Amino acid sequence: MRISVIGCGYLGAVHASAMAELGHDVVGIDVDPAKIAALAAGRPPFFEPGLAEILASATATGRLRFSADIADAADAEVHFLAVGTPQAADSNAADLRFVDAAFEAVVPHLAEGALIVGKSTVPVGTAGRLAGRLAELAPHASLVWNPEFLREGYAVRDTLEPDRLVYGVGDDHAASVLDQVYRAAIEAGTPRIVTDYATAELVKVAANAFLATKISFINAMSEIADATGADVTALADAIGHDARIGRRFLNAGVGFGGGCLPKDIRAFTARAEELGRGEALAFLREVDAINLRQRQRAVDLAVAALDGSVHRKRIAVLGVTFKPESDDVRDSPALDVAVQLKGLGADVIATDPEGIDNARARHPQLDYVTSTREALRGADLVVLVTEWREYRALDPVETARLVAGRRIIDGRNVLDADAWRAAGWEYRGIGRP
Ligand SMILES: NC(=O)c1ccc[n+]([C@@H]2O[C@H](COP(=O)([O-])OP(=O)(O)OC[C@H]3O[C@@H](n4cnc5c(N)ncnc54)[C@H](O)[C@@H]3O)[C@@H](O)[C@H]2O)c1
Ligand SMILES: O=c1ccn([C@@H]2O[C@H](COP(=O)(O)OP(=O)(O)O[C@H]3O[C@H](CO)[C@@H](O)[C@H](O)[C@H]3O)[C@@H](O)[C@H]2O)c(=O)[nH]1
């Protein structure tokens, strides 16, 4: 099929490349000329495992093109909207300016029978509003909301082999067109839920609210574990054996960040308040508060490890991205911890395999080094805040030779506490004795 993907960020660039990989004829559109130039040259503008390969092969065949001119999307049968919906500058609500602008920009170019497919995460009610506007401006076209559930770090696989497909539709025709787009996944048995706009929009934010709640639940347990000498990782293993609970997303630590979970639970809360149902989601405020407290707890542990003051102490911060296998530093707990330590007067040396450029652009006041050894050399304290494989694999004996003081805070509970203590380290995890 002929497809356009409007917005080529973390979601859109992967979606465009994956659709071309499936054999569709795709044009990616973005307002950022630098991003378009990189993508058109077959270079991913961000780090995402597997993206470089499918981007290069699809651009080489000519099945995947990029343009900054929306008119180049005119002959597409299906237009995916994948622009950002960040938190508004002055409230918890989602900023829908980019969705509205992209929608208004594509409408004049819609061919007879064209389909607009919303992928961005939006407040419930947005699709209904846009469908009303489409009926006025281009009654020959229709709209579907098809939320995206990919995880950064696994984005290519999640797009090609999703857990489920959700279509919020206004008519049956739209669903059959989208079935052609996703034929490969449907034939492979991917569950497909066809529903109304509001339900589809809610499925997305409900899923993220549930995941965020699960993480904050275990982080709340980690606070109680710290107060009682219990071990939150053993607790998570034990409750996780109950299939109704499940072990995944029960890793206590510095908490969740990124361009999705934090802003999505806030936008969901704000939308519930607009609907006069703020109380129903009041618990999400607590989920957010617990999450932010985890960052403070890591900072407090650092201060305690250095006998009450980090001032002028050299602290190696391992990781700046919000999770491993991504260069994304949006609302990153790791970067937040580094910035807070710097604010307390520490000499922070931060390192990360992929995130340094993005981190430096946001927080130029920190010192960054690309080599882990260089970050560790002479450190009074090591703080592991993003669980990159390289950091999980650190050898306590070898690491001890590099540092000035054998103190480590494991902000992701991924190290073998016994092994580190045996090598003479003062080890502190989150909710671990
Ligand atoms: N990142 C993820 O893992 C992920 C997963 C699922 C859903 N989402 C949702 O997808 C949406 C996009 O997220 P993202 O992380 O890709 O954001 P992003 O900021 O990385 O990308 C958004 C892109 O849209 C472009 N853009 C803005 N206005 C435009 C316009 N009028 N026309 C064309 N392009 C325009 C921007 O230049 C940018 O490249 C959000 O709603 C997000 O919540 C993201
Ligand atoms: O047990 C856990 C699991 C995750 N995290 C943290 O939670 C954050 C989010 O992780 P993850 O959900 O894997 O990353 P995202 O790529 O942001 O993906 C989420 O947000 C996307 C955008 O909406 C959705 O599409 C995905 O389904 C949803 O998982 C990261 O900071 C993780 O470190 C924890 O602290 N403990």
Image (tube, helix red, strand yellow):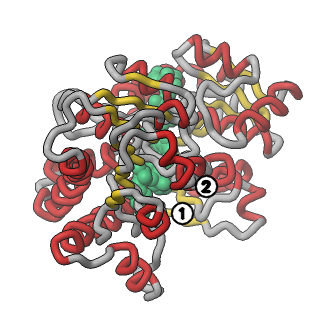
Q: Tell me the residue at 28%/31% (across/down).
A: 339
Mark 2 surroundings: few (<14), some (14-19) or many (≥20) residues within 10 A: some
Q: Tell me the residue at 46%/79% (across/down).
A: 246
Q: Nearer the viewer, residue 172 or 211?
A: 211
Whether residue 286 is visible to the viewer of this picture, yes or no, is yes
Q: Nearer the viewer, residue 217 or 401?
A: 401
Mark 1 residue element: strand
Q: Earlier in the sequence, mark 2 or mark 1?
A: 2
The percent position of residue 391, horizontal first and vertical second, equals: 53, 49
Whether residue 145 is visible to the viewer of this picture, yes or no, is no
The percent position of residue 125, horizontal first and vertical second, equals: 31, 47
Residue designated by label 2: 175
Q: CA distance from mark 2 to mark 1?
A: 7 Å
Q: Left of 19 or right of it: where is 227? A: left
Q: In the figure, 241 relative to 206: above or below?
A: below
Q: Nearer the viewer, residue 149 or 201?
A: 149
Q: Left of 29 or right of it: where is 62? A: right
Q: In the figure, 281 relative to 239: above or below?
A: above
The percent position of residue 395, horizontal first and vertical second, equals: 57, 54
Mark 2 residue element: helix
> Which residue occupies the extreme right position in the image?
61
**Disc number at residue 183?**
none
Q: In the figure, 244 relative to 3: above or below?
A: below
The percent position of residue 123, horizontal first and vertical second, equals: 32, 46
Q: What's the residue type where badge 1 is placed?
A: Val
Q: What's the residue type where badge 2 is placed?
A: Ala
Residue designated by label 1: 194
Verify CB contact (< 8 Å) between mark 2 and mark 1: yes
